[in-house]
Image (cartoon, rainbow, N blue to C red):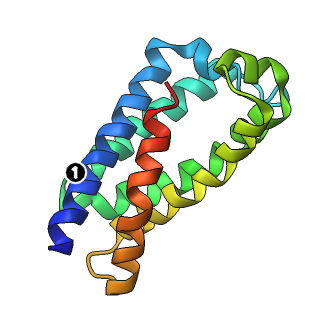
């Protein structure tokens, strides 16, 4: 049963990452506002991060490439974390996203479950307690990110 649920979660995450990656190309301004000002070439950063979200999301689907997709997502999630910090720091970014400083603060720790879920999907076999834990954090994490708009 856990294998079936894990498969469902990997497909959901793959779809989410591909969708968000595409959004980097179709709604670039949405992402530009959270690129910290100290980073050069913000448009390039948005496009490259979106491309990698699409690539790694697709790599999650086949079992043969799932590990590479998951590990790539872990690196990507860590690499884009400064954007989440900047969202917390910037009132302009918060206004653009339509969120408060408190909501931006709440958003910060949600990178951790995404990293944990990516790690879970990088492994073929894991401890049953870890499986249950990942299944428990999957639903609230997905609900949270799907409600971001």
Task: Please state if 31 lies on the left or on the right of 94 as rendered.
Answer: left
Classify mark 1: helix, strand or loop: loop
Q: Nearer the viewer, residue 144 or 9?
A: 144
Task: Please state if 102 lies on the left or on the right of 131 as rendered.
Answer: right
At 26% across and 58% down in the image, what residue appears? Answer: 65
Asked if residue 2 is positioned above or below residue 28 in the image, the reply reads below
Total marks shown come to 1
Residue 145, horizontal then vertical, whole percent: 48, 39
At 18% across and 71% down in the image, what residue appears? Answer: 3
Asked if residue 139 is positioned above or below residue 96 in the image, the reply reads below
The picture quadrant where one finds residue 42 is top right
Residue 126, horizontal then vertical, whole percent: 33, 82
At 29% across and 39% down in the image, what residue appears? Answer: 15
The residue under label 1 is 61
Asked if residue 82 is positioned above or below residue 60 in the image, the reply reads above
Residue 71, horizontal then vertical, whole percent: 44, 61
């Amino acid at each position: 049963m856990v294998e079936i649920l894990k498969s469902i979660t990997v497909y959901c995450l793959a779809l989410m990452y591909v969708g968000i990656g595409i959004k980097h190309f179709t709604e670039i301004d949405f992402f530009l506002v959270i690129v910290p000002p100290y980073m050069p070439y913000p448009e390039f950063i948005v496009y490259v991060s979106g491309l990698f979200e699409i690539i790694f999301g697709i790599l999650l689907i086949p079992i043969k490439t799932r590990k590479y997709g998951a590990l790539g997502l872990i690196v990507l999630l860590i690499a884009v974390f400064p954007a989440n910090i900047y969202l917390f720091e910037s009132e302009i970014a918060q206004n653009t996203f339509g969120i408060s400083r408190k909501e931006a603060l709440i958003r910060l720790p949600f990178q951790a479950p995404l990293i944990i879920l990516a790690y879970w999907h990088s492994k073929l076999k894991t401890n049953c307690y870890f499986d249950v834990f990942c299944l428990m954090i999957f639903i609230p994490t997905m609900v949270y990110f799907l409600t971001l708009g």
